[in-house]
Amino acid sequence: MIREILKYPDPRLREVAKPVPVVTDELRALIDDMAETMYSSKGCGLAATQIGVNQRIFVVDCAGEDEPSDLRVFVNPEIIETEGSQVWDEGCLSFPGVSEEIKRAEQVKMRALDRSGKPFEIEADGLLAVALQHELDHLNGVLMIDKLSAIKRRMMGRKLAKAKQDDAEV
């Protein structure tokens, strides 16, 4: 089922997600909805908080258009190591129509549970590292606009307003 994605400045995007006590069939159904919602919106990541669910879960799929799907599920994720830095032009399903250059760690090591509740660790760089950090920020109530200077925040506000106006005209 495709869920509605919350758009900035919805205050629910600022809530810190609560840990998942146990992975259940109900949770797996939510994960399936999240993946379907992400794919239908042409995103590469979606946090539960973006659909108004206050739980520490996100999904990512950074496969290119000509590659097979690479859906990854993260329950109760935490970054255990970071290295280097990179700047990436990021978009966000909660900020439709805009993107901004954001500085993040170049490499990350993350620990989480998979959709079965089994613990795993992953090391990532490039787009996957960016996506993991971006989605984890969502679970902590941190949005990409928070990573910008005051001037860039104002510019992004104008871009959002224009994108919203353009959508209304379509």
Image: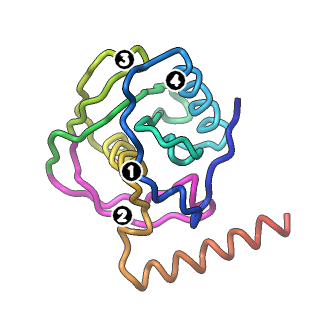
- Front residue (pair 1, 92): 1
Distance of label 1 from label 3 (alpha carbons): 22 Å
x, y (%) of residue 1? 70, 29
Earlier along the polypeptide chain: callout 3 or callout 4?
Answer: 4
Label 3, label 4: how many angstroms apart (C-alpha)? 10 Å
Circle 3 SS class: loop
Does the segment drawn in magenta span residue 101?
A: yes
The residue carrying mark 4 is 27
Please, what secondary structure does the residue beneath circle 2 have? strand
Q: Earlier in the sequence, mark 4 or mark 1?
A: 4
Give the residue number, with chain letter if any, for mark 1.
134
Q: Which residue is mark 3?
A: 117
Q: Residue 46, can we see it?
A: no
Residue 23 horizontal/vertical position (percent): 42, 19
Residue 78 forms part of the magenta stretch: no
Residue type at numbered disc 1: His
The first of marks 2 and 1 along the sequence is 2
